[in-house]
Image (cartoon, rainbow, N blue to C red):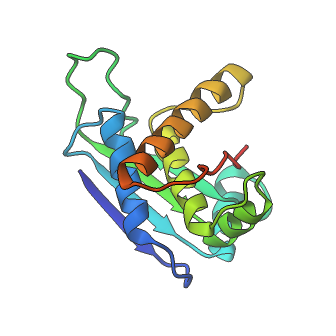
Amino acid sequence: MSIDVNNESGTEVDEQAILDIARYALTRMRIHPLSELSVIVVDADAMEQLHIQWMDLPGPTDVMSFPMDELRPPNKDDEEPPQGLLGDIVLCPEVAEQQGKDAETEHSMNEELQLLTVHGVLHLLGYDHEVPEEKTEMFGLQAAIVDGWRAEKGITGPSPAPTVS
């Protein structure tokens, strides 16, 4: 799996954890091992520009996903996953830091960025949260992936609750 993490934000983030959790999520979702993903970390001004340009919404947001080949997880265990370009995930540590502080279970900016990375991966794979049924499915899968990754890494304590809406 080819995953590039580019930090253009000027904020120190745990790039290795972002890389690791993205790889874990893609493996768990059974995405082809030769597929490619790009994660870009930007400051609030750059994120605001993207948010206005692509969503016509003011202010910076936490995460944006830009799919390329619209890859989807295989439906059956014996089905071979397609190979391709997943696309880009853009993260904003400034928004992530505030969300971590405001969360029901307060957590660090890096923990929030890990959660947002999984959230972005799921968006690239076609998951959404516009309607209640989709939100339940996506956020349940997101929690399971984050919890599984944390358990594999030996990270204890409560997992960050979803803060994205």
User: Percent from the top left, x then y, of residue 110?
Assistant: 55, 67
Q: Is residue 131 above or below residue 35?
A: above
In the rendered view, does 70 fall on the left or right side of 120? left
Q: Quadrant of residue 82?
A: top left
Q: In terms of image quadrants, where is residue 52? A: bottom right
Quadrant where the C terminus is found in the figure? top right
* Number of numbered tags placed on the structure image: 0
Up/down of 33 relative to 81, above or below: below
Q: Quadrant of residue 33?
A: top left
- Residue 112 in percent (x, y) is at 60, 59
Q: Is residue 78 above or below residue 69?
A: above
Q: In this rendering, does residue 60 appear at all?
A: no
Q: Nearer the viewer, residue 33 or 139?
A: 139
Q: Residue at x 64, y 53 (%)?
A: 54
The residue sitting at 47% across, 66% down in the picture is 40
Residue located at (70% from left, 66% from top): 95
